[in-house]
């Protein structure tokens, strides 16, 4: 609203009621046998067995591609050669000389195959080269997939052109089997982000719900450790249209809502080496923003480990509590929680690209005395900034947010 509106009219604003906190349970099954897709709005779990698929092909459009391998199944991906003429002579005895490749843990659209050595700039796509005359990407790399049971399959991409064509063969312990050719068109499963293929059953499979039916994926995946070593972890990746911010326990920080799919990740829990039981940081909160603007706060409660694969967490739709408003300059602003039981509140705001307006937050007593003021920078993105207001007495205050020529006032209660 414009600044010209009467400031004291905010006294008549009602405080948003606290949303209901519900506890959700996800079961990955013993030994994490399932990958589980979860939809927050309906608390719906959709499990798929880890063993269903080997390779996933991104299918959102004919102009974008990605090829991921199944970390949850324990598949290790290698580049065995960048010369297709070596196809017949690939020898598993040379594994030590192959290059290990990994799926990206931050974006869906970069799989292990996409991290191959074919980088003929600007036409290299990791596993192949784009041909400007045919508009096809033609494969140039030989990959080998090593399974947890020490069996092998070699794969070479033929081309991408409205779908994926590839050739593969299995190692029987002494020789490679006859080549098999498969085609996975982008038109398969049009409501999904990826199409999946099993090299063991020689067939396409469905291993993902419709894109509109999930927000979070509970799974095993390869992640970079502090020691700069990739290691298999159990954690949470999020939907490509979701953004997440982490609020570390006890921290007073400015948080950026990230599109990195591992923002929730795996480090909300640690393994107690004395008891070999997992300890969950129940105070660590994640704010999950869906494509429709709904924002959930989640915090994990328990993690049973591989014995049952059971994970519990609290979830709360805080969209209404935020009381978010979007101004004509495209800035969105809200406050959470309200009322606050510990005199700490989060400013949740989104700044559009190119915004240069000055953004100011001021807190007044109900008599109009200024009690606190802080600025918010104009960097584009979705953010959370925690304010510790313990220096104020318990009671009701007025919080005024100014952004350029626009402003809003909210009544807040500190208990």
Image: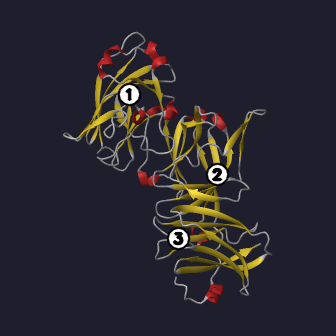
Classify mark 1: helix, strand or loop.
loop
Seen at 58% across and 60% down, the residue is: 296
Provide the residue designation for mark 1. 199
Classify mark 3: helix, strand or loop.
strand
Q: Position of residue 70 (x, y in %)?
A: 46, 34
Label 2 packing within 10 angstroms: few (<14), some (14-19), many (20+) = some
Real-space Cα separation, disc 3 to disc 1, in angstroms: 47 Å
Q: Position of residue 293 (x, y in %)?
A: 50, 64
Split into 4 quadrants, where in the image is the C terminus?
Answer: bottom right
Label 3 packing within 10 angstroms: few (<14), some (14-19), many (20+) = some
Q: Assess whether mark 2 and mark 1 are in contact (beta carbons under 8 angstroms).
A: no
Q: Position of residue 41 (x, y in %)?
A: 53, 59
Provide the residue designation for mark 2. 313
Q: Earlier in the sequence, mark 2 or mark 3?
A: 2
Real-space Cα separation, disc 2 to disc 3, in angstroms: 28 Å
Instruction: Nearest to the eye among marks 2 and 3: give it.
Output: 3
Q: Which of 163 and 260 lies nearest the eye of the viewer?
A: 260
Q: Earlier in the sequence, mark 1 or mark 2?
A: 1
Instruction: Nearest to the eye among marks 3 and 1: give it.
Output: 3
Q: Residue furthest left?
A: 133
Classify mark 2: helix, strand or loop.
strand
Q: Which of 311 and 89 lies nearest the eye of the viewer?
A: 89
The quadrant in which residue 231 appears is top right
Label 1 packing within 10 angstroms: few (<14), some (14-19), many (20+) = many
Q: Assess whether mark 1 and mark 3 are in contact (beta carbons under 8 angstroms).
A: no
Q: Is residue 2 left or right of residue 133?
A: right
Provide the residue designation for mark 3. 332
């Amino acid at each position: 609203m414009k600044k010209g509106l009467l400031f004291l009219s905010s006294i008549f604003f009602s405080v948003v009621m606290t949303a209901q906190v519900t506890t959700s349970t996800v079961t990955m099954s013993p030994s994490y046998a399932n990958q589980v897709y979860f939809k927050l709005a309906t608390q719906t779990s959709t499990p798929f067995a880890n063993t269903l698929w080997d390779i996933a092909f991104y299918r959102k459009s004919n102009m974008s591609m990605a090829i991921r391998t199944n970390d949850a199944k324990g598949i290790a991906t290698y580049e065995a050669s960048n010369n297709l003429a070596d196809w017949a002579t690939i020898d598993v005895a040379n594994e030590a000389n192959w290059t290990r490749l990994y799926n990206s843990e931050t974006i869906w659209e970069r799989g292990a195959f996409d991290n191959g050595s074919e980088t003929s700039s600007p036409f290299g796509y990791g596993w192949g080269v784009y041909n400007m005359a045919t508009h096809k990407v033609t494969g140039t790399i030989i990959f080998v997939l090593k399974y947890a049971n020490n069996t092998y399959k070699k794969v070479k991409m033929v081309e991408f052109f409205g779908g994926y064509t590839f050739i593969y063969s299995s190692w029987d312990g002494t020789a490679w089997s006859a080549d098999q050719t498969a085609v996975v068109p982008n038109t398969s499963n049009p409501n999904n982000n990826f199409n999946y293929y099993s090299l063991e059953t020689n067939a396409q499979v469905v291993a993902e719900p419709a894109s509109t039916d999930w927000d979070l994926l509970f799974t095993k995946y390869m992640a970079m450790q502090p020691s700069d070593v990739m290691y298999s972890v159990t954690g949470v990746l999020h939907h490509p249209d979701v953004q997440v911010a982490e609020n570390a326990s006890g921290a007073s920080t400015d948080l950026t809502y990230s599109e990195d799919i591992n923002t929730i990740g795996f480090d909300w829990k640690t393994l107690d080496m004395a008891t070999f039981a997992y300890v969950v940081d129940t105070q660590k909160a994640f704010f999950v923003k869906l494509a429709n603007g709904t924002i959930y706060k989640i915090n994990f409660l328990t993690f049973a480990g591989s014995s049952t694969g059971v994970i519990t967490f609290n979830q709360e739709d805080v969209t209404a509590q935020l009381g978010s408003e979007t101004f004509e300059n495209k800035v969105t602003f809200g406050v959470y929680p309200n009322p606050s039981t510990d005199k700490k509140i989060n400013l949740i705001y989104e700044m559009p690209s190119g915004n240069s307006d000055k953004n100011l937050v001021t807190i007044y007593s109900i008599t109009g005395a200024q009690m606190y003021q802080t600025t918010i920078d104009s960097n584009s993105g979705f953010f959370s900034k925690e304010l510790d207001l313990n220096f104020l007495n318990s009671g009701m205050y007025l919080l005024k947010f100014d952004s350029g020529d626009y402003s809003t006032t909210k009544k807040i209660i500190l208990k």
